Amino acid sequence: MRGYFWDIILLLGLLIIQTVILGSMPVKMDFTFLVIIRVAFYASLLPGIFFVLIAGWLMDVFSGNSCGMFMLIYPLLFLLIKKIDRHVDMDSFFIESLFALIAGILETVLIIFIISFFYNSFSLSIMHVSFFIIQLIIFSMAAPFFIKQQLDKSSTKTYVVQR
């Protein structure tokens, strides 16, 4: 887990902000998913899965949701992001925002599917949909700042000059 110290601090800080400070607001932001996207771009597979499982467990504990929901969703999305990362070049704010928007939509769909499958009492209202849209817009605008910071560090290339 070397090299993940600041990501763990960022994850814990965002969890505290998300659950304690912003917990009473009607729009629930999943800031921890920003860290998952960030880690998916630079972590190798096994340490990344381990980090994502811990992040999912912490999210389950802090949010009070059904136990294991985020421990299931985060690794699935981590693997999907790792797969897509091989084929998409994140070189502009627009592409990073679009990628985060699509990932956020997938996360929201998975959450709705799991809640409706296990509890049969989840129904979408216009208010829920408007909150999801607001959350996704904020999420997609904030994500490039998390992604870009890590990509700038990891994309430094070394060129060898032959004489």
Image (cartoon, rainbow, N blue to C red):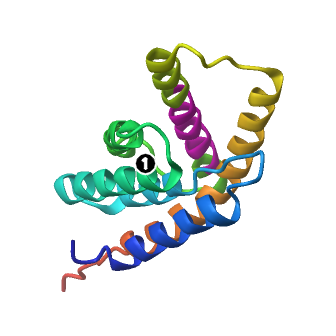
Residue type at mark 1: give it: Asp
Residue 112 lies in the magenta stretch: no
> Badge 1 is on which residue?
60
Disc 1 element: helix
Q: Nearer the viewer, residue 10 or 84?
A: 10
Residue at 53% x, 63% y: name it.
15
The picture places residue 97, in percent across and down from the top left corner, at 63, 49
Tell me the quadrant of the picture where the N terminus can be found: bottom left
Position of residue 7 relative to residue 64, above or below, is: below
Position of residue 138 relative to residue 14, above or below, is: above
Tell me the quadrant of the picture where the C terminus can be found: bottom left
Residue at 57% x, 35% y: name it.
102
- Give the tally of numbered discs: 1
The picture places residue 72, in percent across and down from the top left corner, at 34, 37
The image quadrant of residue 78 is top left
- Magenta region, mostly helix, strand or loop? helix
- Residue at the far bottom: name it: 163
Position of residue 153 relative to residue 98, above or below, is: below
Question: In the drawing, does residue 6 fall left or right of residue 105?
Answer: left
Residue at 26% x, 56% y: name it.
48
The picture places residue 58, in percent across and down from the top left corner, at 39, 57
Position of residue 149 relative to residue 110, above or below, is: below
User: Dot 1, how many residues are within 10 Å of its Cα: few (below 14), some (14-19), or many (20+)?
Assistant: some
The picture places residue 54, in percent across and down from the top left corner, at 31, 57
The residue range painted magenta reads: 97-109
